[in-house]
Image (cartoon, rainbow, N blue to C red):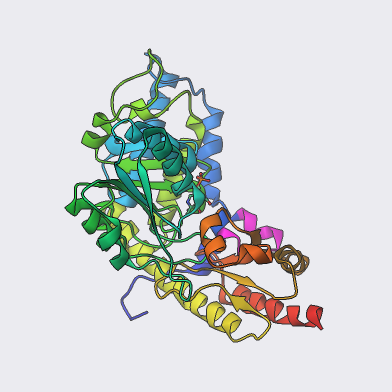
Amino acid sequence: MHPGEPRLDVARVRGQFPGLSDGFVHTDAPGGTLLPESVVHAVSSAMRVPVANRGGVFPSSSRTEALVAGARSAVADLVGGVPTGVVLGPNMTTLTYAVARALARTWRLGDEIVVSRLDHDANIRPWLQAAATRGATVRWAEVDIETGELPAWQYDELITPRTRLVAVTAASNAIGTRPDVAAIAARAHAVGALVYVDAVQAAPHVFLDRAALGADFLVVSAYTWCGPHVGALVADPGLLAELDPDRLLPAPDRVPDRFEAGTPPFELYAGVTAAVDHLAGLCEESAGSRRERLRDAMAAVAAYESSLFEWLDQALRAMRHVQVVGFPEHTTPTLSFTVPGMRPRQVAAELSRRGICAWDGDFYARELFDALGVNELGGAVRLGLAHYNTAEEVGYVIDSVAALRGALL
Ligand SMILES: Cc1ncc(COP(=O)(O)O)c(C=O)c1O
């Protein structure tokens, strides 16, 4: 961090999270972050007044329209989109299934799609299942098993004139790897293929720019960035208009509503807006539009988190009883590790006994952990940082992982 660069006042930030008062060290952020008071307040306030369905001519219905518009505009600011290109839904998985089904209607026998072994299953299985319905060929981008990287160069061979879709993650939920999505997207666009980017794990840590990434579709889940359990898909409204999603006959056919099946949790949309506002407000000295403040805030978040993460990562790699999975160069502050001789569940239970929240398992990165041989060991333990974690907490986590050695003797 250089003088003059936006800074994160972590003590101030922590005061905004009532959940931190449980006394635990929350290193489970990739599975869902804690909620700031502003988000809790926004949702409860939305529930204190009448909230009707959309489309009515009375005030409580207009209020709901405002909740929807607010959340769309907030997500657009978060990732660099326009509100009319923001589809809200229950989660990333459901949205991806909806788009996969709609896109598959445009595929023909012999068309090809490319998925990656690095991805969460939610950006693999819906595509495989959609491809199977059309007789499309699936090609796999492989992970370098030494480093956990997803080399962009392999897409030169994987992408052909028959490629219709490339699905890739902006950050691995298991080992943090951040592939060069822009380079992959450029290769896909050269043959006219669409690019579907899973930004569920990138959004909490980096300033996203959908256009710069080359993402025709970009998906996020608010619960990884201090929001409620709501997902969002962002695309060009023109592209959304071309597709034919499953929808009910009387349901609106306009974009983006045509992708939003059924009655959603409108109250939670207030929390989505508040979560984006929380992120945009992380740097007190920052000014300008919400998008501009997000740029500063995410730069400060990235600088802060990466200094803590580097320490955590290096300390764990130096422990002889610990094996950190992969060694990617560009990462989010997320890692997975194993302790040979202990099941991941045992490790997580021991950390929990010490007051540390850490996930164990395969985190739905099934293909990745199969490729790396981690599933043979029962998966791994995952530690992921958020902007509310402190150096003191990281030090405590390092000491606690070091102390696992005692359990092995
Ligand atoms: C990288 C990544 N993609 C997709 C998902 C699935 O998201 P959702 O739970 O919103 O369906 C997750 C969930 O953890 C994830 O980490």
Location of the N terminus (image quadrant): bottom left
The answer to whether 180 appears left or right of 21 in the picture is: left
Q: How many marks?
A: 0
Residue 229 % position (x, y): 53, 42
Vertical placement of 89 versus 199: above or below? Answer: above
Quarter where residue 118 is shown: bottom left
Residue 257 % position (x, y): 35, 27
Q: Can residue 365 be spotted in the picture?
A: no
The answer to whether 70 appears left or right of 403 in the picture is: left
**Residue at (75, 71) in percent of width and height:** 342
State the extent of the magenta-drawn residues as a range: 18-29
Residue 108 is a magenta residue: no
The answer to whether 334 appears left or right of 161 in the picture is: right
**Residue at (51, 62) in percent of width and height:** 13
Vertical placement of 9 versus 233: above or below? Answer: below
Closer to the camera in the image, 21 or 374: 374
Location of the C terminus (image quadrant): bottom right
Residue 53 % position (x, y): 46, 20
Q: Can residue 295 be spotted in the picture?
A: yes
Closer to the camera in the image, 321 or 52: 321
**Residue at (56, 36) in percent of width and height:** 44
Residue 403 % position (x, y): 74, 81
Vertical placement of 245 versus 33: above or below? Answer: above
The answer to whether 42 appears left or right of 210 in the picture is: right
Vertical placement of 365 versus 122: above or below? Answer: below
